[in-house]
Image: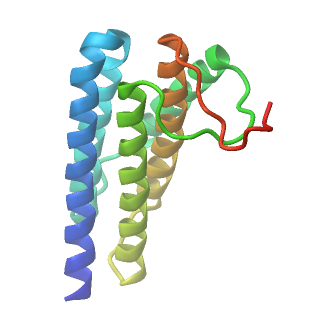
Amino acid sequence: MLKINYMTEAKGAIDELNCHLGKAIAMAKIDLSEIVEELIELQRNNFLVSDSLNNETKINSKSISFLENKVKKYKEIVGKFDGFILQGGSLLSAEIHIARAVNRRLFRQVTYCSATGIDVDSIIFDYLNKLSGYLFTLSKYINHRLGIEEIKVYEDQK
């Protein structure tokens, strides 16, 4: 029974993540259309993750490379990360932060699946971990492109 609950929760988290990404896509069409296609690609990849949880693994290293390349590109534009920031900024960036938080919950749910004996391919963990980093970097990129200054967690941060 426990295994079924963890799998159900994981699949529900994927659905919730894709809903937040869908909202972000709608917002990006207005605020930053250049990221719409990559967000749609994430939604498609998340369906592959869902299918991979109870079938043969369909997510692959190409999906991970996609995320790594985007993170590299955005870090070059945004610059060095220095300290902790409060989630938010623009509405689009805030929505991406919510998607990142849902993705972290999904990662925990997939971990629970694995811990209860459900066979989870390690590439799923790699993908979800890279997705979290991508979403964080994307939120910083969005605020940068929209000219919105981020708020540091600690006021004495430079």
Q: Position of residue 106 (x, y in %)?
A: 36, 59
Residue 151 vs 16, above or below: the answer is above
Q: Residue at x 53, y 17 (%)?
A: 148
Q: Position of residue 67 (x, y in %)?
A: 48, 33
- Classify the position of the N terminus by image quarter: bottom left
Q: Residue at x 25, y 24 (%)?
A: 25
**Residue 117 left/right relative to 137:** left
- Classify the position of the C terminus by image quarter: top right
Q: Residue at x 47, y 12 (%)?
A: 146
Residue 30 vs 2, above or below: the answer is above
Res. 152 image quadrant:
top right
Q: How many numbered discs sit on the rendered protein?
A: 0
In the picture as drawn, the residue positioned furthest to the front comes out as 155
- In terms of depth relative to the viewer, which is nearer, 47 or 81? 81
- In terms of depth relative to the viewer, which is nearer, 2 or 69? 2
Residue 91 vs 97, above or below: the answer is above
Res. 79 image quadrant:
top right
**Residue 123 left/right relative to 119:** right
Res. 153 image quadrant:
top right
Q: Residue at x 73, y 38 (%)?
A: 155
- In terms of depth relative to the viewer, which is nearer, 51 or 96? 96
Q: Position of residue 125 (x, y in %)?
A: 46, 57
Q: Identify the image's colour scheme: rainbow, by chain, secondary structure or one colour.
A: rainbow
Q: Position of residue 65 (x, y in %)?
A: 50, 33
Residue 18 vs 65, above or below: the answer is below
